Image: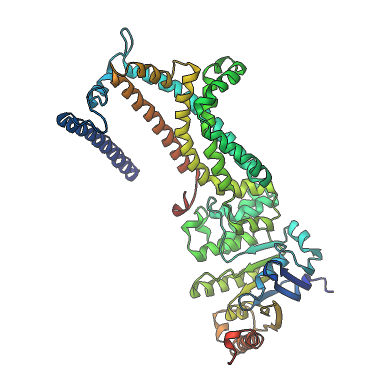
Amino acid sequence: MPASLLHAARRSLGVGAVVLALAGLWELYHWIWTTTGWTHPFAVDSTSMPHVWTILKAFGQPAQVNQPALITILFHKSLFTAKEAVVGFALGAVVGFALGVLLAHSRLLQRGVTPYIVASQTIPILAIAPMVVVWVNPKLPGPFQGWGSVAVIAAYLTFFPVTINTLRGLHSADARALELMRTYAASAWTVLWKLRVPASLPYVFSALRLAATASVVGAIIGELPSGLQSGLGGAILNFNQYYSIEPQELWATNIVAALVGIVFFSVVVAAEKAVVRRAPENVA
Amino acid sequence: MSAELVVSVSGVTKTFPRGNVTALQDIDLALTHGEFVSLIGPSGCGKSTLLRVIGDLVEPTAGTVTVNGKTARQARIDRDYGIVFQDAVLFDWRTVAKNIALPLEMVGWDRDRRKARVEEMLDLVELGSFAEHHPWQLSGGMQQRVSIARALSFEPALLLMDEPFGALDEMTRERLNLELLSIWETLGSTVIFVTHSISEAVFLSTKVVVMSPRPGRIAGTIDVDLPRPRAAETREDPHYFELVTAVRELLRKRGEHLLPEEEPQ
């Protein structure tokens, strides 16, 4: 236990050092560009690159009069967006995995369906979001109204890497292991659950890591056409309009959005560590 | 036919359409209960293919295989085969105990019965203290012992071993040879053992079947009448050397005209 505590302490120290270094580099860049007056690639001033302390101070102040501090507002908004992202992630992961399993069992289906799955990902999410809102929202029960369709949009961004990697992972089972299962006269179902799925987990989890961040992006973007004001997407849209006056508020929101993504990613990594039992050199 | 006949192979031919290779030609082989038969021969003599045909992993082009009076396919469905490959083929995500329990889950044993049997098997292969380890934490020899325990856990009628010790060092191999013999004597299983090693074949077997390549054929069969139980001293027995020489000569005689690099100009 003390060893793992030490490890954790060392890690957080490392993370803190990186954050400090990044802030330092930001300010250094700011200082060089403002003192020399360089305009390439862009002119630096308090609008294009607000000071780190201006951004930090913005967290503590209300964005509008008679409102709580920005950090309180952003906290509630990020909870709302996280809710959409979690549901979207779960939905996308389940659909993505099921689709992968289905496609793995039929080469014909795989050939027929894969082009459409790929095509679905080349269409920008902003072009599909309005349709999803119009189609899905009226069908949703009360408590899911509004944000439910955003979760579907997040799921739309999530399922793709999961399907592709599940498919690959299911085919990664060792040929000898498949022969072994054959000598046990194992059914296709047994082979799936006792061999193919466990063998696919490292692949599935590397897809879930991608999906974790994609689901947050999907939730934020999905809020824009839905006209939702309760999440980070609404806040970003709002602060965009005031960027030339108060850029620090958009920066502060971006930092919170990034933190949500990092938290999601870390949860998936922790789940992977708990679930995937593999030789250290074989973990994808 | 004797009631004890476990495996009967008759007139088995296997050609692979790709490259039109005849892996096996007109093979006849019979094993009675409790026999330990080694298949030995150079690479490409079809010994592994023959093992796979018997285990219904490969379908013969012609001929029949009967196992316990059934077709090979029915025998496989009835779970008459335990198999051990050159690699242990353990599931990384399962502990040693769970790996051994894998076939027992398929056979449908309940948890308590599985647990008891796994403990028995762990004792048999002397890995009792490694039950909760994962495969990658074990040495190659230990992994192969787990693989043997898994193959024997459900008491299959026939144990198929495809160069099980081929990837291990000489010392580990000799120790595992002794362990395998003691397990075989304890359980009274019937074993088909594919190997490259003449000394291993003679040391272990009741019968050595020598095969020759292109096309794969049985060159001859040598009965090994060395006393049992066999021990490290068996390898120093003059009769052991006679048998090793007999196998070697059979391999050489059959192989001579087939190996172009050995032909005089």
A271 w.r.t. B142: above or below: above
Can I make out residue B190 in this image?
A: no
Does residue B204 appear left or right of residue A20 in this picture? right
Residue nearest the viewer, comparing A214 with B186: A214
Q: Is residue B10 left or right of residue A284?
A: right
Q: Residue at x 27, y 25 (%)?
A: A48
Residue B147, position in %: x, y?
A: 58, 61
Task: Kindly identify the residue that appears in the image at 59 percent across and 47 percent down.
Answer: A170
Question: Looking at the rendering, which quadrant does residue A24 occupy?
Answer: top left
Asked whether the viewer can see residue A46, the reply is: yes
Q: Report the side of B110 relative to A124 (left or right).
A: right
Residue at 54% from the left image edge and 55% from the top image edge = B96
Give the residue drawn at x 51%, y 66%: B141
Q: Residue furthest bottom?
A: B265
Q: Is residue A7 above or below residue A241?
A: below
Q: Quadrant of residue B154?
A: bottom right
Residue furthest right as drawn = B1
Rendered image coloring scheme: rainbow
Residue B56 pos. (x, y %)? 72, 62
Q: Is residue A22 above or below residue A202?
A: above
Residue B231, placed above or below residue A32: below
Image location of residue B33, percent across then percent down:
74, 71
Q: Position of residue B102 (x, y in %)?
A: 62, 53
Quadrant of the image containing the N terminus of chain A: top left
